[in-house]
Amino acid sequence: MISLTDTQKIGMGLTGFGVFFLFFGMSLFFDKALLAIGNVLFVAGLAFVIGLERTFRFFFQKHKMKATEFFLGGVFVVLIGWPLIGMIFEIYGFFLLFRGFFPVVVGFIRRVPVLGSLLNLPGIRSFVDKVGESNNMV
C-alpha cells in the first residue's frame, strides 16, 4: 500500500472536495460560487499532494504553456463571473495538461471487470482508443 504523508492526505481531501464542488456547480447550471470554490480547492489540493515546487514545474513547463494558459485562464474567467466560458477554457486546458496520463488511465480502466467490458463496446471502443493515444489530442 502507498504511504501518504499528512500533507498529502490533506491534499487528497482538498482535491476530492474540489472535484465534488466542480461537478456540483456544473450540475446546478454553472453556479459561479461553487465552481470558484471547486477551482481553488482543486488547485490547492494538487499543490498539497505533489508539493508546491513540483506543481509550478508541472504547470509552467515550456511545452505545456498553452494548456496552462487555458486552464488558469478558465479559472480566472470563472472567478470574475463567466462560468460557462471559463469551464470551456478549463476543460480544454485540463485535457491538454493531462493528456499524457490518459493512456495510463484507459489501460487501468480496461482491467476493471465491469468498466473494461463497457469500454470494449463497439461505439465506445473507437473513441477510447483515440483518447488512449496521447499524441493525437493536440
Image (tube, helix red, strand yellow):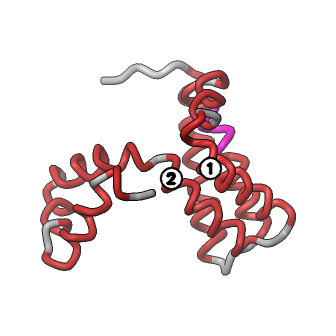
Please tell me which residue lies in front, 122 or 45: 122
Can you say whether 12 is above or below 106 in the image?
above
Where is residue 85? Give x, y as percent: 71, 72
Q: Amino acid at mark 2?
A: Leu
Identify which residue is drawn at 45% across, 57% down: 138
Inter-mark Cα distance, 2 to 1: 8 Å
Does the CB distance between marks 2 and 1 fall below 8 Å?
A: yes
Q: What residue did someone put label 2 on?
A: 96
Residue most toward the right? 80
Main SS of the magenta part reads helix
Question: Element at badge 2?
Answer: helix
Q: Residues within 10 Å of mark 1 (few under 14, many from 20)?
A: some
Q: Amino acid at mark 1?
A: Lys
Please tell me which residue lies in front, 78 or 130: 130
The image quarter containing residue 131 is bottom left
Identify which residue is drawn at 26% across, 64% down: 128
Which circle marks residue 81 in the picture? none
The image quarter containing residue 3 is top left
Q: What residue did someone put label 1 on?
A: 66
Identify which residue is drawn at 60% across, 32% down: 10
The image quarter containing residue 23 is bottom right
Residue range in magenta is 42-47
- Going from N to C along the chain, the mark reached first, 2 or 1, is 1
Front label number (2 vs 1): 1
Where is residue 20? Give x, y as percent: 57, 58
Q: Residues within 10 Å of mark 2 (few under 14, many from 20)?
A: many
Where is residue 70? Give x, y as percent: 66, 56
Q: Quadrant of the N terminus?
A: top left
User: In the shown orientation, is residue 52 left or right of residue 114?
Assistant: right
